[in-house]
Amino acid sequence: MMHGSNSKQAIISLFLLGITAVAVVFVYSGLVDITNKIIRQRTEVLVDRALDETADSLRQEVQSLSDSLARDVYSDMLAELQNEEGASVEELNTGRKPAYYREYIASLNEMYDREEGSMTGLLERLLPREDDVEYRISSAEGPDLSLDYDETECRINKYSLDNVIISYIKGNSVLGEKTYSIDIDPPEVSFIDESGNFFDYSLISMKGIYITGQTSSFVGSMYAGTHDFEEGREAEVIYGEKDPYGGINFLTTQAAVYGDSLITTGDINLKGAFVLFGSDDDLISIYANTINDIENYPSKTEYTVNGYSFLRDGSTDFVDEDHYNGIIRTINSVAGRIDDISSVYDSREDGSYTGSVQKIVSNEDVTVTSDFTGVIVTGGNVIIEAGCNVEGLIISGDRIYIYGNNNIVSSREVVSRLLAEEAADRSRDGSVPGVSDYIGALME
């Protein structure tokens, strides 16, 4: 028989045991809730991050598609431009830029045409693929095209794909979705006078042209800029240049220069040199600060100008200033793009190159050691060794050094052919820089 006190103790023990069990269950349930909440929060963070990364990837793919489309439109127009040889500057430029943007916008609209349901499908095809996760584009509320185009200024202020809803799906569950706006950065394009500005040049140097050696001849227009005193080099002191530094310099050489114009923002320095500018049949126009004839015993300094000298030193009238300044602006616009070259390409070292003329596009110094027919565009110096003949065009963001016994000849045919071949090369993906990115129609 159980005594009363023992029975009471047993009841109390059972009661306490029940309370403990309930407490354990409550604590366990609370821990499960906390754990599930942490898991949910972590999943949400991971899904949110994955959606943002997916949107960034989509932006890159959309931009790449748009850039490719722009290159196609540009190439088609450039190919048409090559067929207009002999056209006036006005004919070359009239309506060119508006026509480009109209065609570019029309091509984009066609590619992203929502009415045919192509936008959603196209964007989904551009989404990344993962083994256990699927991404989808919702078509219920979008996406939509948004365009802000200033036709007067020929400028696209904004072109975007708005209300792009990306869903993150795992199994049969939608674990998250976010809405994005995909902005497209259209290329800036400006068309300039193809024939007058570059096709007839042989040498363009932003900081000076330096010519020495025995005899050389130059056929084609030339341009040379200047450089600061701090950029002066000891080797250049012997040419006799002074403030402004740079310009066009002849040292102990006999040279003949034939072309439409010789233009420099600095001086023309002749030191112990005999130079013939132009001829009775081909008159030349010289634009410079002054022409310095510097004696260099035992070599005599002599020069003859068959044509017109427009000098800022007051010795002649400086006429047609607008034409002169227009050429400088155009050349400076090219120089700005040369500064953006980030790689080195030399067709002579490319076994897969199928072009008919050579091309070099570089951010480093270029040395010519043998005959060269083609175009060189570099942000560095160009060094033409003695005895090398060049046909085509050289553009240097720095200086050009020519060491004698050279024939440097401009060639409209060579430059035109190279640009036409680049325009027809649809496989050029932008990773290999092209000459047409810097001359002809200028594309940023």
Image (cartoon, helix red, strand yellow):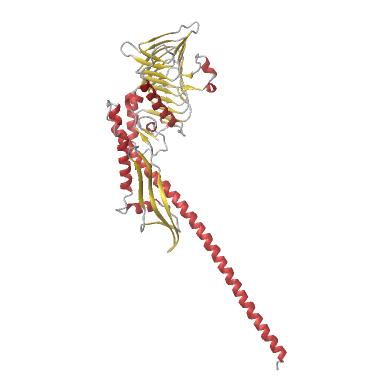
Q: List x then y, in percent, for residue 71.
A: 35, 39
Quarter of the image with the N terminus is bottom right
At a point 62% along the width and 77% down the height, the residue shown is 21
Q: List x then y, in percent, for residue 422.
A: 35, 33
Q: Is residue 236 left or right of residue 418?
A: right
Q: Could one spot residue 348 in this view of the protein?
A: no
Quarter of the image with the C terminus is top left
Tally of numbered tags: 0
Please name whichever residue, 332 or 53, is drawn nearer the observer in this view of the structure. 332
Q: Could one spot residue 177 in this view of the protein?
A: yes
Residue 173 image-quadrant placement: bottom left
Q: Is residue 336 left or right of residue 25?
A: left
Q: List x then y, in percent, for residue 343.
A: 46, 34
Note whether 154 is above or below 122 in the view shown: above
Find the residue positioned furthest to the bottom.
1
At a point 54% along the width and 63% down the height, the residue shown is 39
Residue 99 image-quadrant placement: top left
Q: Is residue 343 left or right of residue 105?
A: right
Q: List x then y, in percent, for residue 371.
A: 40, 21
Please name whichever residue, 392 or 228, is drawn nearer the observer in this view of the structure. 228
